[in-house]
Amino acid sequence: MSVTMRIIQQFDATKENEFMDFEKKFADLEKERPDYPKGKRMQPIASGEPCNSLIWQCEFQTIGEAYKTLDFFNGDAAHEKLLEGQLPYFRQVKIEFYKNLDF
């Protein structure tokens, strides 16, 4: 059973451009580094999440792999440096896990 992990980041709506500038740098980092998981980024239009949210999601073979990715992010110097700059724009972060149903 595969698992989808979603990281939902709510940001200060008045600082959307600044937040998204950092997010673009995260996306560039993913593209440049083969060791990074390749996630998909989305912003709600009509959703249970507010429009001033960014959702990063990625599919993993197991929930253990998803947790390893969180550990990887926390231990990666390039990720931590970008996160340090982006943190002032955060309002809330949630991490969700979904089992993918293969009927």
Image (cartoon, helix red, strand yellow):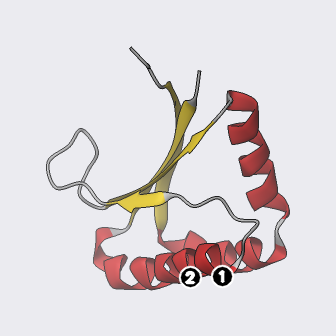
Q: Nearer the viewer, residue 40 or 12?
A: 40
Which amino acid lies under the numbered mark 1 shown in the image of this protein?
Glu
Residue that label 2 marks: 28
In the rendered image, residue 77, in percent from the top left (x then y), is placed at 83, 75
Structural distance between the alpha carbons of marks 1 and 2: 6 Å
In the rendered image, residue 29, in percent from the top left (x then y), is placed at 63, 79
Is residue 5 toward the left or the right of residue 67 in the image?
Answer: left
Which amino acid lies under the numbered mark 2 shown in the image of this protein?
Asp
Res 32 label: 1
**Please, what secondary structure does the residue beneath circle 2 have?**
helix
Residue 101: which quarter of the image?
top left
**Please, what secondary structure does the residue beneath circle 1 have?**
helix
Mark 1 or mark 2, which is nearer to you? 1
Name the residue at 25% across, 51% down.
Answer: 50
Q: Nearer the viewer, residue 90 or 3?
A: 3
Residue 64: which quarter of the image?
top right
Q: Residues within 10 Å of mark 1 (few under 14, many from 20)?
A: few
- For the N terminus, the quadrant is top right
Name the residue at 44% across, 19% down.
Answer: 102
Is residue 103 toward the left or the right of residue 1 in the image?
Answer: left
Res 20 label: none
Say above or below: 66 vs 84.
Answer: above
